[in-house]
Structures are given as C-alpha cells and as structure tokens.
C-alpha cells in the first residue's frame, strides 16, 4: 500500500505477506492494515482507494450488505 499527501507526494509505503482464502478477504485485510498505518503515522483525515467495489461499498454503506467472507475483518476497520 502507498500513502500519499494532499499534493500526491510520497508519505509512506508498506508491504505485507498474507495467506487468505480469497482476494476479497486479502483486500479487506489490506484496508485494515492501511487504517493501522494511518493511525501509526498520526494521520487524522484519510481517503481510502481500492479496486474492490465490494470492500468500498461495504465500508461506505452497510457492512451487512457486503461480502460475508470479509465481514470479520471489515468490522475492525
């Protein structure tokens, strides 16, 4: 994952190796790790982007309407 500032400048990056049963679960875990990294860096306002419409929709609207396989991880975000 990459964190960029308001002007698009590089702030931080991280890479994690995970073993998950599905890509959706891996993307949910990446979102959680992104939240943790933002907190660690003291960032107060963040915008998350993902190529997973399911994950973004679940976080933006309602977790109960999203992917059940990613639900446990998304509850932590």
Image (spheres, rainbow, N blue to C red):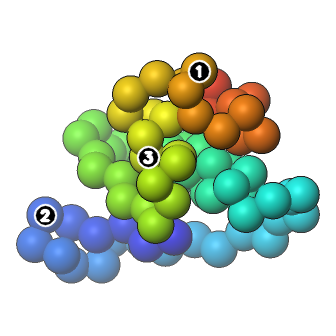
Q: Position of residue 4 (x, y in %)?
A: 28, 69
- Furthest toward the front, the residue is 65
Question: Disc 2 versus disc 3: distance between alpha carbons?
Answer: 21 Å
- Answer left or right for 39 relative to 3: right
Question: Disc 1 versus disc 3: distance between alpha carbons?
Answer: 13 Å
In what element is the residue under mark 3? helix
Q: Residues within 10 Å of mark 2 (few under 14, many from 20)?
A: few
First in sequence: mark 1 or mark 3? 3
Q: Which one is nearer the viewer's eye here, 69 or 19?
A: 69
The numbered dot on residue 56 is: 3
Going 63% across and 49% down the picture, which residue do you hit?
28
The C terminus lies in quadrant: top right
- Answer left or right for 77 relative to 57: right
Which residue position holds label 1? 64
Which residue position holds label 2? 6
Going 46% across and 54% down the picture, which residue do you hit?
53
The numbered dot on residue 42 is: none
Q: Nearer the viewer, mark 2 or mark 1?
A: 1
The mark total stands at: 3
Q: Residues within 10 Å of mark 1 (few under 14, many from 20)?
A: few
In what element is the residue under mark 1? helix
In what element is the residue under mark 2? loop
Q: Which one is nearer the viewer's eye here, 1 or 72?
A: 72
Q: Position of residue 21 (x, y in %)?
A: 89, 57
Going 53% across and 47% down the picture, which residue do you hit?
55
Q: Nearer the viewer, mark 2 or mark 3?
A: 3
Q: Position of residue 17 (x, y in %)?
A: 80, 71
Residue 48 visible, this angle? yes
Residue 70 position by quadrant = top right
First in sequence: mark 2 or mark 3? 2
- Furthest toward the left, the residue is 7
- State if disc 1 and disc 2 touch (CB < 8 Å): no
């Amino acid at each position: 994952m990459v964190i960029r500032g308001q002007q698009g400048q590089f702030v931080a990056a991280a890479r994690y190796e995970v073993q998950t049963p599905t890509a959706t679960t891996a993307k949910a875990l990446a979102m959680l790790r992104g939240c943790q990294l933002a907190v660690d860096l003291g960032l107060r306002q963040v915008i998350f982007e993902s190529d997973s419409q399911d994950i973004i929709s679940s976080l933006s609207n309602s977790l109960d309407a999203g992917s059940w396989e990613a639900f446990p991880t998304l509850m932590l975000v």
